[in-house]
Image (cartoon, rainbow, N blue to C red):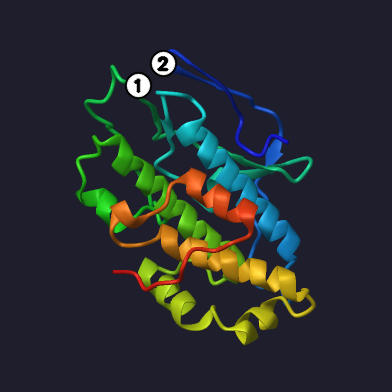
Amino acid sequence: MFLFDPILACKANSLIIDFSPSTCCFLGHGSREVDWHMCYKLIKGTCEGLRYLHEGCGDRPILHLNLSPSNVLLDENKVPRITGFDFSKLIGEKNTKSVNAQIKGPLAYLPPDFFHSKGTDLKYLATVDIYSLGLMILDIATHQGIKGNHDILIKTVENNWRQDSQIATLYGSLEDKFQAQVKMCIDIGLHCVKSMPGDRPTAGEIIRWLDKGSKPVPGQRP
C-alpha cells in the first residue's frame, strides 16, 4: 500500500508530485474517546512516507524541513500523504553545499537546534524531520497538542503518559494489546525528540520498531 506522499519518483534534480485529491483531516483534539486504529494508521503511514523520502531515493534523499500536522493530508481512502514541500531540497552528491530555506511564519514542529544550525549536513537535516515526526507522534497518541514550548508537551508525556491509567482514560475501550501499542508509539515519539540530534533514530529504525511491535528502551532526554 502506498503510505507515503505524493512523491512518485526521484529523478535528477526534480520532484515528481501527484496532485491527487486530498483533504486536511489531521485528527483533532477534544473528543472523549479517540479512535486509536485511525491514529495508528496515521502514525505508521507518516513514518513510512518519511522513510521513503529519506531512504527510498538512493543517494538523493528528500528532506522535508517543515513536517507538521497541517502538511499531512488524508486521501479518499484515509491514507496519510505528506505534502507541503516548500522548504525541502532534493540533495545529491553534487548539491550538498547549502540548504537555504527562507522560512516565513510559525513552524512549531521544528527542533530548537535547527535555528542555530547552518543547515548544510544531510545527516543532521534528517534528524530535523525526525524531531518533527516525534512531536507529531506524541500529539497524535496523547492529543495534548503543541502549546508554545515543546518541552511542555514532552515533559507532560514523560511524566504522565507512560502510566496505563492515563492511556486508559483516552482509550477506554481499547484492548490491552492495543494500549501497549499506544505506549510503544509514545516511547518512539520520545526517542525522536531527544535534545541531541545524534541520539534521534532514523526513519528506517522507527519502521522496524513499529513492524516488530517492540519499543526502544525508555529513557529520559539528555
Q: Residues within 10 Å of mark 1 (few under 14, many from 20)?
A: some
CB contact under 8 Å: marks 1 and 2: yes
Residue that mark 2 sits on: 13
Nearest to the eye among marks 1 and 2: give it.
1
Q: Of label 1 and label 2, which has the lower sequence position? A: 2
Nearer to the camera, 70 or 1: 1
SS at badge 1:
loop
Q: Residues within 10 Å of mark 2 (few under 14, many from 20)?
A: few
Q: Is residue 85 visible?
A: no
Res. 23 image quadrant: top right
Residue 131: image x %, image y %? Answer: 40, 54
37 vs 157: above or below: above
Q: Is residue 112 visible?
A: yes
66 vs 32: above or below: above
Res. 18 image quadrant: top right
Residue that mark 1 sits on: 92
Q: Which disc number belongs to residue 115? A: none
Number of numbered callouts drawn: 2
Residue 49: image x %, image y %? Answer: 57, 39
Residue 155: image x %, image y %? Answer: 40, 76
Amino acid on which the number 2 mark rests in the picture: Asn
Q: Identify the residue shown where x is 59% and y is 42%.
A: 48
In this rendering, position of residue 195 left or right of residue 41: left
- How far, Cα to Cα, is label 1 from label 2? 8 Å
Res. 165 image quadrant: bottom right
Amino acid on which the number 1 mark rests in the picture: Gly
Outermost residue, top direction?
A: 12
Query: Which image quarter is the C terminus in?
Result: bottom left
Residue 16: image x %, image y %? Answer: 55, 20
Q: Identify the residue shown where x is 65% and y is 52%.
A: 42
